[in-house]
Amino acid sequence: MGQAQLHITRYGAATLAVLRDVVREVKAGDPLAPVTVIVPDHLTGLTVRRTLARGLTDGSPGIAAVDCLTLAGLAERFAAPVFAAQSRRPATAALVAACIRESLSEHPGEFGVVADHPATSAALERVSRELRLVDDATLASLRAEPGTLVREVLRIHDDVWVRLSKHWYDEADLLRAAALVCRTPAGLSPTVVYLPVAMRPVELEVLTALAAASDIHVVCGVTGDARADAGPLRVAAAVTGSAAGEVGSGEASVTVPAAESDPATADRVIHASDADDEVRAVVREVVAALGTHPAHRVAVLYGNRRPYARIVQEQLTAAGVTFNGPGARPVTERAFARFVLGLLRIQRSGYPRADVLQTLSEVPARAVDGSAIPAASWERLSRNCGIVDGADWRDRVDATIATLAAREDPHGYLARRIAEATTMRDTVWWIRDRLTGIGGSATWQEAADSLRTLVSDLLPDTQAARLPPEEQYARVSVLGAIEGLTVLDESAIPVSLVIIEEVLIAQLESATMRVGRFGEGVYVGPVESGAGLDLDVVVVCGLSEDVYPGRLSDDPLLAEAVRETFGEALVTLRERIAEKHRCLLAAFALAGEVAVTFARGDLRQQTQRIPSRWLLPSIRSLTGEMTLTATGFADVSGLTEVASYTSGLSTATHLATEQEWRLRAGLVGWRFADEALTAARAMNAGRGDREGGRFDGMIGVDAARLSPLSEGEYTSPTMLEKYVACPFQHLVNRVLRVSPIEDPESIVQVSKADIGTFVHHCFDVLITERQQSGQLPGYGEPWDQQAHVRLLQIADEFAAEFVTTGRAGHTRLWEQSLVEIKGVLQTMLDVDDSDRASRGLAVVSSEAGFGRGGVDVVLDVPGGTVQLTGAADKVDRAADGTLVVTDIKTGKPGRFMQICPEDPVIGGTKLQLPAYAHAVRALYGDAHTPVEAAYWFVGDGDGRRRVPLELTAEVDTTFREAVGTVSSSIRDGVFPLRPPATDDFSWIQCPYCNPDGLGYAEPRSRWQQLRGTRPLRDLVTLIEPDALATTGDPAEEEK
């Protein structure tokens, strides 16, 4: 029977001092006497080794014969030879995950509808790992639970380990076997259990076996809070055999010395507006601490990895501070891992366009021909092809290639587009075939080799060598995980891409990434990792209530009610919360200087925050307000407030980065010869200018060459109408060539614009064919029956093209839309027959083009001449020679009904008919030929509504003045944002004024400010004449 001693002390330097004394006592002057120190984690083990290496007595550095092991490491040392003798090997994460997937596939049971989802396998794997540490009696009781779900979980768990237990072992097997080995005292050295944490019965059994067989010391750290300390003290009591008194809610414990019973508190509490400002304050604290302390004695601990791990590491990097600790992102979130897992996911989901391109853009991947994949170019190309998923990668690309090949290509641009589309199609289809082959592999070794080869073909070693260091690490981890698939050949599990994906995820989630080397620079890690560190300065961030402890959720497979029933066998929410509290209080006791921070809000979620419940003792101590509640922190003194980003810059005693120093200098009036800063000041000044500037679209004479008044420039009436609707749209779309991006996946129903295109195309093809064959209807003659049949044939042919190019939307909805479109087309012929019969008209042409290689239509306007271009939808001729031009509309009449002699162009928004009148005179008559014009609304009601426009001299004058005003405004570089008068409802009316979909408040306010300025006066007189009455004449205001 061994001797057991318990040493209770506060966390921090005191525990290391006690450990040093205990090891010295155990060695009893023999430097080679073996001692085993069991530590809770590897980080604590490093701290212990480095502390003991400084010597057990002052002036005598060095240590020998001391082993620092975790409990799992000790169990492996003792029990691994036992399993090796039985020819049993470690059950890898890959093997367990594959067995769970196989069990679900064979007998899904209650998991039927979700059995194929990866999250189901992951949740079962997590619960199964916990159940492995449960004793047989508890498992038997769980099987008898009334809930069906619990029994199903146990069924899957039992089935998996029936498959594995004969040839494989896991950590639970090691622990049980180690407990048996430890009962034989031969060869056991004295043991020190350092900083024990809450344990499951199987784990505790190993320590009690050690205590029974050899001398054991327990150095137990305490926080002074009974609930937080209950887990470690329960372990200490069981190991040392000391069970006395009641602590907290009835857990057996030992008596805590009175000197250690007061929980530690923070020395400073800092609060900032959001997490980003909070971390900036943290880094300033670190920079200040580094002035008086070595970096390895300083630590930043965060309450939650998201978003703090990433922000802290980024800000420390910007400040030039060396640091070490867990990586900000797990391996599964690294680009290389996302690339490989993405390849497997796109096969499962049917190769959706967005997912395929996202996957190929994660790394500098290569196409099937070895060229670099231009991800951005393929993104645009795939959208233009209308690709959604699956066979679209072949069919719709082929259709696009055929369309491009049929067009003239004098400069070779289309040939390059065709080559790019071909490469994109071949690459995706090549990946598809390779993945299909991997899924059909005969062995797991073959599947692993094929997957590794595919990854290497897409990202050759020469390209992979250029990846950042963290991605290099991720690549090694992923390729190692792929190699780990080969172990599945020793099972009866068939090859499956789904299993490959789940196995890789299971293996990669256990892979940890580290930044730097422990002891080099500031340590950065979660609060839970800090209890065993030896430090001088600790800064704890992320201590708002919703971050730490956060919202701990119930387990969906083993509910809290079940866990509570079985006490210590299963981890409960209460224990998880107590463990978080213990880690935080331990962090407060780690160092002589402790600062904590929390954010008052979350700008990402637009929510307010309050400090953590466990931060209240520190706040009350610092403020002297012992009854203060969490919501009252802003009303008391004693805390450090960072009111805003600007406030932090202007009031901080230490700044961390060069950027912060530059910004502070800017705040006090310094001026730098910096292009970016100068441009930013110019932008701010321009946006505040009453007369407007280039940031409002008022670019001035730079746009003169873009004006319709410029020689050689062709202008369509539609373009001028769009300018009037929103001048800024003209600048961005027509000049800068930037337009909103539409996802093919989001096209559920054919758009109204495409319906218009469809109707125009079909009617034009019919008239053109009849014109070429000399079969156009004569004066007052109807369309013959063959024309009706042919029009429907044309519709079917064009509909097939619509589907192929992805413009048709969902199949069911498109079928309904096509029926409606065909009805409109048939009605058009009937209405056209009736209208022409009543007036004795003959069809002349459709889509009568002018300008740009056709008949020149030159318009004299105020300020110069404008060359018009476009195409008139339909032209008829009366027996007396009168030309009748019709502009076909498939939408509602709307504002067209406002056309009148006093305002024939509706403020410059309706310019097509007067322009077409000039065009048809040039095409089919002369300057004296009478012309009639009308808008024909074929999709409105019975399709008979027409809005005529009498083309008088006054109308022509008004038209010319409008064209001249718009053309002069473009020449003068006037492109302000002119948002719609009404807010958006189901769609965004002007994506150029409202690109983020948040509304038009700011653009409307700016338009109202600018529309009365001198540069806009002529344009506003045309488009909003009433506005000048409210804004006044700026020339008069200056007098």
Image (spheres, grey):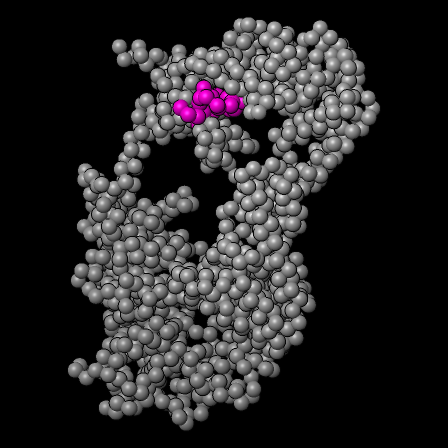
Q: Is residue 805 above or below residue 906?
A: below
Viewport quadrant of the C terminus: top left
Residue occupying the far right of the picture:
785
Residue at image coords 21%, 61%: 290
Whether residue 644 sits left or right of residue 881 in the image: it is left
Q: Quadrant of the N terminus?
A: bottom left
238 sits to left or right of 498: left
Whole-percent x and y of residue 694? 35, 29
Locate residue 1033, reporting x and y percent: 34, 12
Q: Which of these two is toward me, 981 or 752?
A: 752
Is 635 magenta? The answer is no
Please indicate, yes or no, whether residue 154 appears anywhere in the rendered image: no
Q: At 61% across and 30% down in the image, what residue appears?
A: 753
Residue found at the far bottom of this picture: 186
Q: Which residues are magenta?
A: 704-728
Q: Which residue sits at x=32%, y=14%?
A: 1034
Q: Position of residue 894 (x, y in %)?
A: 59, 19
